[in-house]
Image (cartoon, rainbow, N blue to C red):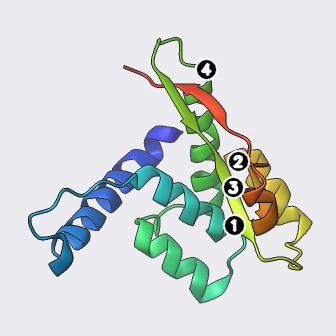
Amino acid sequence: MGSLLSPHNADFAFSLYKKLSTHPEAKGKNIFFSPLSISMALSMLALGAKGNTHSQIFSTLGYSTLTPDQVNEGYEHLLHMLDHSQDEMLLEAGSALAVQEGFKPVDKFLKDVQHFYEGEAFTRLQISLGSVKRRNCRLPR
């Protein structure tokens, strides 16, 4: 299932790199970013989006031909595979949503973020106190 997302994520990564590298401030500089992290964060955001906003997020990521279930299950599978790799390389990753103090996201959204993305929602205060959990994953070779 994760391979279903691979071509879309690769296209997004190259498109984002092209956009970043043509920015005047990037001229002659190295560019470092994690396209998978960005794709995953936007996909988590799409869990709570509806209508035009959801369509724009999916279009930006190149997921227009995929259903939300395919995308969410693809990330669930990818995270599962990273967690269960037998290789000796270690990846520390985490998914978290910064939530404005006093804002209460819908329970289904929070449950879906936890289920599909192994993520949690935190307020700014919780993040500054170091409450965000990290996951250890093994990278496939």
Q: Residue 87: percent from the left, percent from the top?
A: 47, 12
Q: Which residue is mark 3?
A: 96
Instruction: Write down the quadrant of residue 28 in the picture.
Output: bottom left
Mark 1 vs 2: CB contact within 8 A: yes
Could you say whether the residue bearing mark 4 is in a helix, strand or loop?
loop
> Which is nearer the N-term, disc 1 or disc 4?
1
**Residue that numbered label 1 is attached to:** 47
126 or 72: nearer the viewer: 126
Check disc 2: other Cα within 10 Å, few if <14, some if 14-19, many if 20+: many
Mark 3 residue crowding within 10 angstroms, few (<14) / some (14–19) / many (20+)? many
Residue highlighted by disc 2: 116
Residue 64 falls left or right of residue 82: left
Callout 4 amino acid = His
In space, the residues marked 3 and 2 are separated at their CA atoms by: 12 Å
The total number of labels drawn is 4
Nearer mark to the viewer, of 3 and 1: 3
